Image: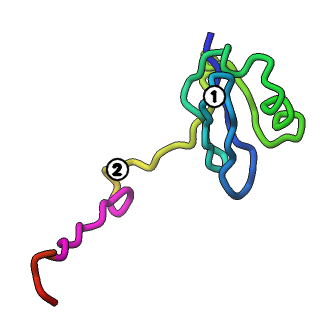
């Protein structure tokens, strides 16, 4: 079984330590990638964050709601910026 974690904070990222020693950095309102349930089982810090209302933990087969991305075909939506040319490092100025 897999789980996902979502940050419920309104501002600032949150670091969630996992049982394997790795950590997951979550921006406000974002879901993590799928994680094994063993990564979050009996994790005291994760339980504390959940009790405080900072995070939500859900089974991944429930397909948590993701924010809808704007249609890239619409004019102005998702338009990429033009890349600026890089400065030359060999110039003497």
Report the residue at 69% width, 34% height from top: 17
Q: Pinpoint residue 50: horizontal percent, then vertical percent.
A: 83, 34
Count of numbered tags: 2
Residue for point 61% across, 37% down: 24
- Name the residue rendered at 67%, 43% in the picture: 15
Q: Main secondary structure of the magenta part?
A: loop
Q: Which segment is the magenta one?
A: 75-87
Residue 60, given in percent of the width and then of the height, sits at: 61, 20
Could you tell me residue 92's position as x and y percent? 12, 87
Left or right? Give the position of 36 relative to 80: right
Q: Is residue 2 magenta?
A: no
Q: Is residue 70 left or right of residue 7?
A: left
Quadrant housing the C terminus: bottom left
Q: Quadrant of residue 37?
A: top right
Can you tell which quarter of the image residue 77 is in? bottom left
Residue matched to label 2 = 72
Residue 85, magenta (yes or no): yes
Q: Is residue 90 left or right of residue 15?
A: left
State the image coordinates of residue 49 (x, y, percent, origin top left): 82, 37
Q: In front: 92, or 37?
A: 92
């Amino acid at each position: 079984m897999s789980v996902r974690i979502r940050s419920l904070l309104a501002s600032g990222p949150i670091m969630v330590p996992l049982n394997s020693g790795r950590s997951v950095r979550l921006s406000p309102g974002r879901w993590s990638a799928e994680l094994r349930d063993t990564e979050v089982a009996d994790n005291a810090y994760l339980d504390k964050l959940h009790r405080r209302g900072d995070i939500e933990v859900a089974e991944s087969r429930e397909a948590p709601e993701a924010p809808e991305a704007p249609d890239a075909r619409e004019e102005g939506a998702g338009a990429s910026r033009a890349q600026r040319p890089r400065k030359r490092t060999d110039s003497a100025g």
